[in-house]
Amino acid sequence: MKKVFISLAVILFLLGTSVYATDTRLKGLGINNWMIEEDDNLIWLNPARVNDYSNLVWGELGVAAAEDMDGNPEVNSNLTIDKQWGGVSYGLKLGKQSVIAAFVGRPDTTKNLGLIGDVGESIGGEVIIPGGGFGNTLTPVNKFDIFYGLGISDKLKLGLMLNYASDSDTNEFSVTDNPNPFSWKTERKSSDTNIVIGGYVNDVGPISQLDASLTLSMPSVNNKYTGSNLLASNSSDDRELKTDGALGLSLNVRGIVGLNDAMKLIPFINYASFKVDNEYTDRRDTTGDNTLNTNYEQNREQQENDLTLGVALNSKINDKTLIITAVSLKRTKKITNAKTTIKLLGEEGIRYEYNSETTTTDIPLNIAVERVLSKTFTARLGVLKSIYKTKKIKEDDPTYGGWDGTAYPLLNTTTVESSKDQADDDGTEISLGMGANITDTFKLDAVVRQQVLFSGTYIVSGVPETLFGQLTATYMF
């Protein structure tokens, strides 16, 4: 138990000095976690993997360099540290061998809420939800990640992960010393709860390890605006944006097949479906009697389906060199069906409508090399290039006429289809990384900022720059 308190003290110290994500080694190699046979980042792919990493402290030392609007590092601002977090795992002996782990401050990777987008945006040029600050959804702030791993036997391991993120704000404003006093209040709330269950089994025929995990995501948004004034034509109003049946499911299956002692083949399948339907309602006092009537409603059906099929080859060509080659097929389909329904007294019907379907197909190729330089240092290099990538968009944009006494008549529907080859747009990505074994139990991993290799250090260029763009510290107790 004393070791647990010491580990917690270490993580709190690292959080105080800045802490980030457990993917620094992978960033240096330029690969995804499923592509490598063994790495502590695999706990985020399958929580059962936490059974393999008990009694560890992860100290994420941050991401250096501010970013511009395009996500590129700003050289003169890169001394800023961002995205800092950490965690600790501890092995228990409660009948069966088990492991618990907790992480705090992990940057949220919520994908579901991103489907809603900024509510002030226009969809199809017509279907618009007014923003005004209240409508824009908040990105949830990750509160915690809790793992529990259970070793049923040497062959079968199970795991569970619970993640919760949320954020909220409230703003109030009022003017009383005015001929027409008014006030308004906005309340915004966003949250996301993720439950992941997983397991892996050893020695299933030719497969030395078989992983499977299932993620259930439950995002939520509820933004409200209320206002009142003494104008005769509009004494009060309220608006509300909320999710309606939002749900996400994701399934991962991964195997490791030993071709020989030095070569491991890793097939991988991921299927994910995210459905984030949302509804915006505008209510106003159109008669001046302090009774709110629905002015209009907007309903968005938003869904994303992702499929990834991949295979990686880990080749240990000697005791010091690991080569990873991976190719995958990624297909993403995003669907948006939106409509605005007018609900005025005596005038009700669909006024605007817009439907779109965007399909992206990508075949990226990864090649990575990890080389042990000495007992202390390890170097990493990765290359990523899309050998095929296309984006297809289909849009249906119906046009409705003015109120004819019974409805808004549908005049016509414009359908536009487009396709673009994007393989050359992405270019080639090169990654550099370093690892250092400070002691047998304390290790550092770093992503090297390539800009410094061109501009030189401060002594050469006179520009203050960081050599490393991301650092992770791990300590085994």
Image (cartoon, helix red, strand yellow):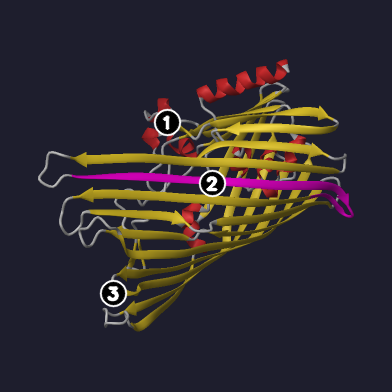
SS type, badge 3? loop
What is the magenta range?
A: 182-210
Q: Decide which of tag 2 and tag 3 comes sooner along the chain.
A: 2
Q: Is residue 88 magenta?
A: no
Amino acid type, callout 3: Gly
Q: In which quarter of the image is the C terminus?
A: top right
- Label for residue 192? 2
In percent of width and height, residue 385 lies at: 57, 56
Question: On the picture, is 92 further left or further right than 183?
Answer: right
Amino acid type, callout 1: Thr
Identify the residue at image location x=30%, y=44%: 185
In percent of width and height, residue 103 lies at: 61, 33
SS type, badge 2? strand
Q: Decide which of tag 1 and tag 2 comes sooner along the chain.
A: 1
Amino acid type, callout 2: Asp
Tell me the CA gap for discs 2 and 3: 40 Å
The answer to whether residue 185 is above or below residue 373 is below
Corner quadrant of residue 435:
top right
Pick the residue in front: 413 or 299.
299
Question: On the picture, is 461 further left or further right than 426?
Answer: left
